[in-house]
Structures are given as structure tokens and as C-alpha cells.
Image (cartoon, rainbow, N blue to C red):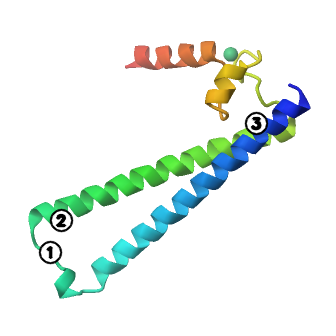
Amino acid sequence: MEKEKLALYREKLMELQESHLVEKKELEADYLHNSQKDESGDLSAYSLHPADMATDTYEKEKNIAILSNLSNTLITINEALYRIEQGSYGICEECRKEISDARLDAMPTACLCIECKTKKSNNKKNDR
Ligand SMILES: [Zn+2]
């Protein structure tokens, strides 16, 4: 891949990394803040309505799910940046062919070409 193109994807990935890190920090702060409120024993904030408690639990579980999603995405972004350093960025990990620009534009963290990706998801379906 040409250096100019690589630099462009690198920039894209760095931006993606930055925005994900910010989002993760906000969620973590939010989560911390909420659990501190729970432990403070402030009776005015205490609610015994089962519906409210269910909503709280649901919100927490949702936050944890989003956080783990964010962490996973950050890992794939790091891996993509590493591949740029190594010079293997844009090459399919399965068949070693070049991944199309269209796919990388839509998904800069892609490490498989569309054919291999499709094959993999089909295999997964067959496993079930
Ligand atoms: Zn492939």
C-alpha cells in the first residue's frame, strides 16, 4: 500500500482511538459515580420501587456491555495501528490478498478481506 494511503488510514485510526478513549472515560466516570451513589447510603436517593431498581440494574448491565464493546474495539484499533507499523496493514490475514479500499474505508480495523470474512461467518452459522 502507498505511504500516503497508509498515513491516511493511520490518521483515521488515531481519531477513532481518541474518540473511543473519550467515550470509555466518560462511561467509566459515569459508572463510578453511580456505584458511589449506591454505597453512600443517602436515604433520599434510595428507591425501593422494584421497577426503578430493575432499570438501574439494566442501565448498569448495558453500561458494562458498552464498555466491553469499547474495549474490544480499542484492541482492534491498536492491532490495526500495529499492522501499519509492521507493514502488513491492508493484507488479509487468511488469504494474504489485499483488502479493498472500500472495505478499509468503511472499516479501517478490518484484518480480513470480504471473502474470508463472509466464509468465516458462514462457518460460524454451520457450527451452531
Ligand atoms: Zn482473504
Front in this rendered view, residue 11 or 68: 11
Ligand 1's quadrant is: top right
Residue type, numbered disc 1:
Ser
Q: Position of residue 65 (x, y in %)?
A: 40, 50
For the residue with label 3, is its CB less than 8 Å from the closest atom of ligand 1? no
Image position of 84 (left or right of 92): right
Query: In the rendered structure, are the residues bearing label 2 and label 1 in contact, judged by CB atoms less than 8 Å apart?
Result: yes
Q: Residues within 10 Å of mark 1 (few under 14, many from 20)?
A: few
* Image mark for residue 9: 3
Examine the image and state in which quarter residue 40 appears. bottom left
N-terminal of the pair, mark 2 or mark 1, is 1
Q: Position of residue 38 (x, y in %)?
A: 28, 77
Q: Residue at x 76, y 44 (%)?
A: 11
Q: Secondary structure at mark 3?
A: helix
Question: What's the CA distance linking mark 2 and mark 1?
Answer: 7 Å
* Image quarter of the C terminus: top left
* Image quarter of the N terminus: top right
Residue extending furthest toward the right: 3
Question: What's the CA distance linking mark 2 and mark 3?
Answer: 44 Å
* Image mark for residue 121: none
Residue 19 makes an appearance in the image: yes
The residue under label 2 is 53
Q: Residue at x 76, y 26 (%)?
A: 90
Question: What's the CA distance linking mark 1 and mark 3?
Answer: 49 Å
The residue under label 1 is 47
Residue type, numbered disc 3:
Tyr
